[in-house]
Amino acid sequence: MSVVAAFSQTSIVDFGFIYDLVKASYCMYYGRPANEPELLFRLLFLQILFNLSDERVVQETQVTWPTNGSSV
């Protein structure tokens, strides 16, 4: 199973609770907008699941990421 295929499978699991857990750590009004905590958690989950290095998980998502504008 590829990383992107596994990522689409993580859509089955509701990771919406992640935002509530880290909400106090993000400023809503100042500074640059933060990366989506849910997306970062999904990438970390896949990195652990497939035993990928940081560089490899970034490479896999850049090369095989869906570009049709659909949400992940």
Image (cartoon, rainbow, N blue to C red):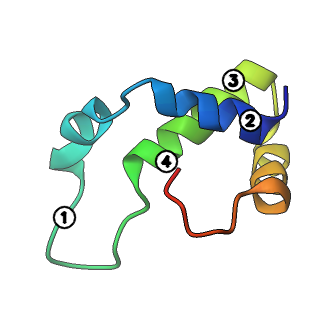
- Judging by the rendered image, the residue that carries numbered circle 2 is 5
Q: Earlier in the sequence, mark 1 or mark 2?
A: 2
- Judging by the rendered image, the residue that carries numbered circle 4 is 39
Q: Earlier in the sequence, mark 4 or mark 2?
A: 2
Which kind of residue does numbered mark 3 sit on? Ile
Residue sitting at x 83%, y 49%:
60
Q: Secondary structure at mark 3?
A: helix
Q: Is residue 62 above or below residue 39?
A: below
Q: Earlier in the sequence, mark 4 or mark 1?
A: 1
Q: Is residue 52 above or below residue 63?
A: above
Q: Label 1: how many residues lie within 10 Å, few (<14), some (14-19) or many (20+)?
A: few
Q: Earlier in the sequence, mark 3 or mark 1?
A: 1
Residue sitting at x 78%, y 61%:
62
Relative horizontal placement of residue 51, taking residue 31 as reference (left or right): right
Residue sitting at x 77%, y 45%:
57
Q: Label 3: how many residues lie within 10 Å, few (<14), some (14-19) or many (20+)?
A: few
Q: Is the residue under label 1 in contact with that under label 3 (CB below 8 Å)?
A: no
Q: Secondary structure at mark 2?
A: helix
Q: Secondary structure at mark 1?
A: loop
- Judging by the rendered image, the residue that carries numbered circle 1 is 27
Residue sitting at x 49%, y 37%:
41
Report which quarter residue 59 is drawn in.
bottom right
Which kind of residue does numbered mark 4 sit on? Leu
The residues bearing labels 4 and 2 have C-alpha atoms spaced at a distance of: 15 Å
Task: Give the foreground label among 4 and 2.
Answer: 2
Report which quarter residue 3 is drawn in.
top right
Q: Earlier in the sequence, mark 4 or mark 3?
A: 4
**Percent coordinates x, y for residue 10 in the rendering:** 55, 29
Relative horizontal placement of residue 14, taking residue 57 as reference (left or right): left
